[in-house]
Image (tube, helix red, strand yellow):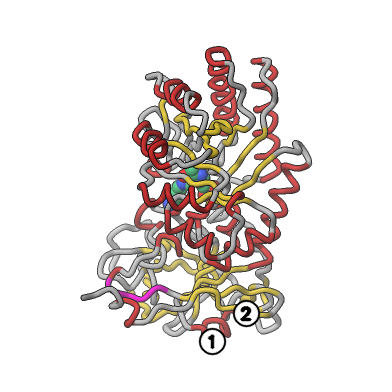
């Protein structure tokens, strides 16, 4: 696990970005999303350097669905990355934050006319086409040329949770290869000179640690591009392989390195191009989780400690009830996702006592089934690590809990980037 700027300070407390976690909890309240800004920026640079060392024409776009707000847009823009948005809301946020539209591309399995219109008016760098109805609707909306990519389901079955696998045969995303849809989509796009086809796109899934799946995707895409070239004489200047690199949530998760990922992808692309005698296209990638997950920590306060009778002997009997849960991070419930916790004020002490950390919502919402901590009492603050991706962005107001605030920390300075919702916010749209 990568801890960014996390360290234990002289008082034995967890510090992030030079800020004491306990002080953060006291100042901003809990639950609190903490963004380690230097860790995020360092990861952006690590990505850029790893790919630049191997290939000059690589376009890295941050996948906004992992977490997006105006401050994050600015950080990503400053780091020189592009932005992959998947909805009108993500696109509007980026535009309002002043993100350069030509560095944005729009995804989605069903983009409404309003979303397509917004993208056209903004002049985004590309619209990633997903289905025939969308091509037709885009054609009706066009008043001038528009850059597009065609999304292909590449027939790559990545080893990850079934709910976040997207490149397999029965995927709902993109044009399928086997039934000829992908080829027909190319034909349709090439026949309209207003649609400027920049190349092809695929995304095989998320939280993938076996790099061979990415190599398989690159091979499949080059094979497809070559078939298109032979049939239509069109050569793709860009192949975008999407995102999906895993991160380590617990010490048991496998190590994954960005340089290894870059080497695997670039080598596979080169190898496939040589095999097909295909001119090497630019490479696009869209990392979300692996850019931001490790820069996020969620702080919770423990409200109660309960001893429960044994039902499942593999689970701890001592429960910590915290002031957050499924509404600020649905991932444990949705995917059985596992996390690691640190005791914020006793960070230097051995973390050996097993606790089951439970959320405060009206259902069974374990945040961590077996967290190893020092002895913990009501009132203590816990830090759940690696929550930067798909926690805040998938949060809800379940039980009508207001959403937490997000604070960026850097060099001992705090910056509130998302305010905590209030009860008034929860009721704002009620009539
Ligand atoms: N590109 C496309 C077209 C995508 O659909 C996604 C993620 C990404 C890029 C970024 O993938 P990443 O690098 O973050 O793996 N809510 C789930 C993850 C859903 C991912 C959806 N698509 C979770 O919490 O695990």
Residue 110 on image: x %, y %: 36, 43
Image vertical order of residue 191 relative to residue 319, above or below: above
* Rendered view: 346 above or below 43: below
* Relative depth, front residue between 422 and 21: 422
In the picture provided, is 10 more to the left or to the right than 94?
right
Could you tell whether 12 is left or right of 216 in the image?
A: right
Q: Residue furthest right?
A: 53
Q: Residues within 10 Å of mark 1 (few under 14, many from 20)?
A: few
> What residue did someone put label 2 on?
414
Q: Which residue is mark 1?
A: 27
Describe the element under mark 2 as helix, strand or loop. strand
Can residue 155 be seen in the rendering of this structure?
A: no
Kindly report the secondary structure that dominates the magenta region of the rendered protein: loop
Query: Front-most of 142 and 134?
Result: 142
| Disc 2 and disc 1 in contact, CB within 8 angstroms | yes
Q: Residue at x 60, y 42 (%)?
A: 285
**Residue 294 appears in the picture as rendered:** yes
Residue 180 is marked as none
Q: Using the image as rendered, state which of residue 86 and residue 198 is in the foreground.
A: 198
Residue 22 location, quadrant: bottom right
Q: Is residue 400 magenta?
A: yes
């Amino acid at each position: 696990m990568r801890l960014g700027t996390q360290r234990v300070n002289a008082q034995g407390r967890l510090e992030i970005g030079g800020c004491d976690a306990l002080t953060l909890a006291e100042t901003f309240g809990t639950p609190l999303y903490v963004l380690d800004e230097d860790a995020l920026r360092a990861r952006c640079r690590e990505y850029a350097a790893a790919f630049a060392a191997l290939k000059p024409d690589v376009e890295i776009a941050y996948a906004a669905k992992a977490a997006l707000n105006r401050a994050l847009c600015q950080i990503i823009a400053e780091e020189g990355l592009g932005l992959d948005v998947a909805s009108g809301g993500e696109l509007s946020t980026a535009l309002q934050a002043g993100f350069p539209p030509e560095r944005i591309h729009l995804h989605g399995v069903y983009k409404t006319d309003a979303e397509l219109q917004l993208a056209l008016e903004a002049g985004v760098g590309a619209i990633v086409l997903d289905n025939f109805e969308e091509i037709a609707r885009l054609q009706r909306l066009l008043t001038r040329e528009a850059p597009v990519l065609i999304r292909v389901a590449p027939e790559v079955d990545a080893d990850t949770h079934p709910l976040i696998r997207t490149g397999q045969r029965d995927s709902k995303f993109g044009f399928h290869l086997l039934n000829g849809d992908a080829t027909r989509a190319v034909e349709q796009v090439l026949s309209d000179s207003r649609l400027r086809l920049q190349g092809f796109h695929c995304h095989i899934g998320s939280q993938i640690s076996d790099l061979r799946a990415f190599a398989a995707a690159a091979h499949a895409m080059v094979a497809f591009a070559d078939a298109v070239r032979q049939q239509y004489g069109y050569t793709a200047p860009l192949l975008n392989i999407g995102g999906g690199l895993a991160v380590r949530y617990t010490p048991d998760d496998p190590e994954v390195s960005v340089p290894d990922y870059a080497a695997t992808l670039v080598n596979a692309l080169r190898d496939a191009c040589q095999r097909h005698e295909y001119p090497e296209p630019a490479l696009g990638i869209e990392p979300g989780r692996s850019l931001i997950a490790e820069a996020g920590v969620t702080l919770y306060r423990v409200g109660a400690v309960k001893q429960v009778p044994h039902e499942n002997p593999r689970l701890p009997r001592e429960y910590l009830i915290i002031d957050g849960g499924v509404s600020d991070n649905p991932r444990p419930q949705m995917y059985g996702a596992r996390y690691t916790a640190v005791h914020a004020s006793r960070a230097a002490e051995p973390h050996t006592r097993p606790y089951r950390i439970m959320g405060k919502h009206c259902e069974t919402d374990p945040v961590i089934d077996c967290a190893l901590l020092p002895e913990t009492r009501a009132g203590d603050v816990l830090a759940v690590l690696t929550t930067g991706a798909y926690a805040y962005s998938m949060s809800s107001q379940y039980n009508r809990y207001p959403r937490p605030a997000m604070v960026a920390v850097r060099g001992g300075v705090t910056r509130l980037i998302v305010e905590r919702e209030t009860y008034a916010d929860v009721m704002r749209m009620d009539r």
